[in-house]
Amino acid sequence: MSHVHAMSDDQVAGELKKMTAFIRQEAEEKASEIRFKADEEFASEKAKLVREETSAIDTSYEKKFKQASMSQQITRSTVSNKTRLRILSSRQELLDSLFEQGSKKLKEVSKDKGKYQSILKNLILEGAYALAEDKLQVKARKADFDLVKKAIEEAQSEYKEKIGKDVSISVNESDPLPEGSAGGVIVAGTGGRIDINNTFEERLKLLETDALPSIRVTLFGENENRKFHD
């Protein structure tokens, strides 16, 4: 018959204490492991959120920068265009003013009789050379008839000297140029169907058209037509 040794209360308490300590240690280790994993997941999630937020901020900044840059370019282009139009408008105003002044001064040319007669002769000759006909008529202001007749005599002599044949030029006294005209003549041939308008007003119009490029170069420089840069 074997003897079973009964454990004393102290021994039972000691074993329970050991078991409790072992369970507590395992629980603490498990809790520590859970906390570690939680910290890892938190750090990972935090890093992911920071990356996403940083990327979103970068994208937003880039978008806003592009918008600002585009807005700046549009503003610069608008200002440039407005400036260009203002410059072109100012230049046109200057050119209009020049030709307006020229138009006013035209009427002063006929005051110097000697100079005016020479001009009339050259205007009549130009028409005679262009028309190349035997008989021509000249229209002029009534007040210029006497000067025109003298100019015609000179023109006929020079025409014969240069061309080698006679030309008969007469004043059309029945149809004069209006007295408001600045002067000059209209030379007509072939029964009046063809004429050369050499009035001062017409010559100024031709100058305005033909000489305008040269005038622009003189006033505004050779690069007058260059593109305007921002």
Image: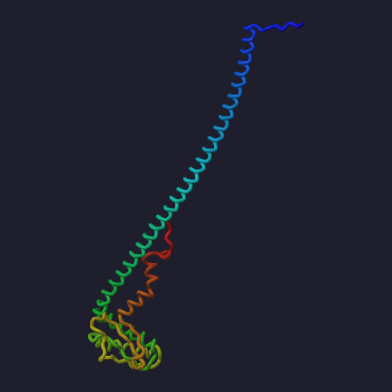
Q: Quadrant of the N terminus?
A: top right
Task: Pick whichever, 176 or 17, lies toward us.
Answer: 17
**Count of all numbered marks drawn on residues in the image:** 0
Residue 38 percent coordinates (x, y):
56, 30
Residue 44 placement: quadrant: top right
What's the coloring here?
Answer: rainbow
Task: Pick whichever, 148 or 211, lies toward us.
Answer: 211
Residue 48 percent coordinates (x, y):
55, 38
Q: Quadrant of the C terminus?
A: bottom left
Q: Which residue is pictured at 32% across the width and 88% down the height? A: 154
Q: Which residue is pictured at 33% across the width and 91% down the height? A: 192
Task: Pick whichever, 14 or 74, lies toward us.
Answer: 14
Is the residue 24 above or below the residue 78 in the image?
Answer: above
Residue 109 percent coordinates (x, y):
27, 77
Is the residue 179 above or below the residue 94 in the image?
Answer: below
Is the residue 10 above or below the residue 73 in the image?
Answer: above
Residue 161 percent coordinates (x, y):
38, 89
Q: Residue furthest right?
A: 1
Task: Pick whichever, 116 or 17, lies toward us.
Answer: 17
Q: Which residue is pictured at 29% across the width and 88% down the height? A: 139
Q: Which residue is pictured at 39% across the width and 71% down the height? A: 213
Residue 29 placement: quadrant: top right
